[in-house]
Image (cartoon, rainbow, N blue to C red):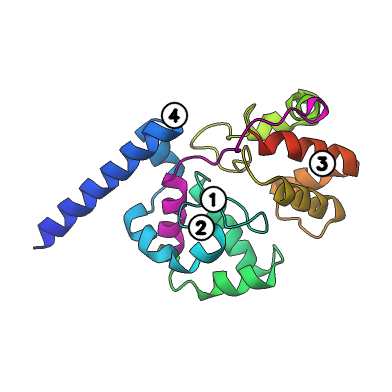
């Protein structure tokens, strides 16, 4: 009986990885790297409390909540721990993160979101100013997020997948980094970069990135 459950679980993992690879243009090995050590099958069961805001498919229920579909598992884990500790401020998420029963639950539910199709915009956004600033090596965006906003590599999780994220969410986060109300980024790099951006430049970059 135990062997049977293990075999079924293994088959479900393979099916989940294979299906995601078809639609996300990722290989199964890339997705596995992005998921880390968690179990996405168990994670799907554990994300019940996340669905009302982030959706079962990880694409959010509105622009008030970020898309998590295809996000790095390690990045999601870091944000949950930062919400718990207060390193990242959000009363609702602080309470939600604190309510997650075990460390394994965090690892598993993060793996589930990471196993899904990478987030994408509904359609490309033609914003030449935003595109130029995002793609300029001098501004540093592509150095961490990749030229399509989907990350540098499946095993490099310090900078999140942002291509296809809601524009409104991206604007809020960049302004929070600029203001200093969010400062849980590695080395304070986002605070430094956004301090040099105007509201218009933030809007332009967010608009362009949201369509990737």
Residue at 58% x, 56% y is 78
Q: Secondary structure at mark 3?
A: helix
Label 3, label 4: how far apart the Cα atoms are: 29 Å
Between 5 and 188, which is closer to the camera in this rendering? Answer: 5
Q: Mark 1 packing: few (<14 Cα in 10 Å), some, or many (20+)?
A: many
159 shown above or below 27: below
Q: Secondary structure at mark 4?
A: loop
Residue at 48% x, 71% y is 100
Res. 207 visible in picture:
yes
Q: Earlier in the sequence, mark 3 or mark 4?
A: 4
Q: In the image, is 136 to the left or to the right of 26?
A: right
Q: In the image, is 109 to the left or to the right of 158?
A: left
Q: Mark 3 packing: few (<14 Cα in 10 Å), some, or many (20+)?
A: many
Q: Secondary structure at mark 2?
A: loop
Q: Quadrant of the N terminus?
A: bottom left
Label 4, label 1: how far apart the Cα atoms are: 17 Å
Label 1, label 2: how far apart the Cα atoms are: 6 Å
Range of residues picked out in magenta: 105-130
Q: Which residue is mark 2?
A: 55
Q: What is the x, y in percent for residue 18?
A: 31, 37
Q: Which residue is mark 1?
A: 59
Mark 1 and 2 residues: CB-CB less than 8 Å, in contact? yes
Q: Mark 2 packing: few (<14 Cα in 10 Å), some, or many (20+)?
A: many
121 shown above or below 52: above
């Amino acid at each position: 009986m135990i062997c049977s459950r293990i075999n079924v679980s293994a088959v479900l993992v393979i099916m989940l990885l294979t299906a995601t690879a078809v639609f996300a243009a990722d290989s199964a090995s890339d997705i596995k790297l992005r998921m880390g050590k968690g179990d996405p099958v168990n994670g799907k069961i554990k994300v019940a409390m996340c669905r009302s805001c982030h959706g079962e498919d990880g694409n959010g229920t509105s622009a008030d909540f970020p898309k998590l579909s295809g996000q790095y598992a390690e990045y999601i884990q870091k944000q949950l721990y930062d919400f718990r500790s207060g390193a990242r401020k959000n009363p609702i998420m602080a309470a939600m993160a604190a309510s997650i029963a075990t460390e394994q639950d965090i690892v598993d539910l993060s793996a589930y979101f990471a196993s899904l199709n990478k987030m994408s915009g509904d359609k490309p956004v033609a914003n030449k100013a935003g595109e130029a600033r995002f793609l300029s090596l001098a501004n540093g965006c592509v150095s961490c997020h990749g030229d399509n906003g989907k990350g540098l590599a499946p095993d490099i999780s310090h900078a999140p997948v942002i291509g296809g994220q809601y524009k409104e969410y991206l604007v809020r986060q960049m302004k929070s980094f600029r203001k200093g109300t969010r400062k849980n980024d590695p080395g304070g790099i986002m605070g430094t970069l956004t301090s040099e951006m105007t509201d218009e430049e933030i809007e332009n970059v967010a608009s362009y990135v949201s369509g990737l």
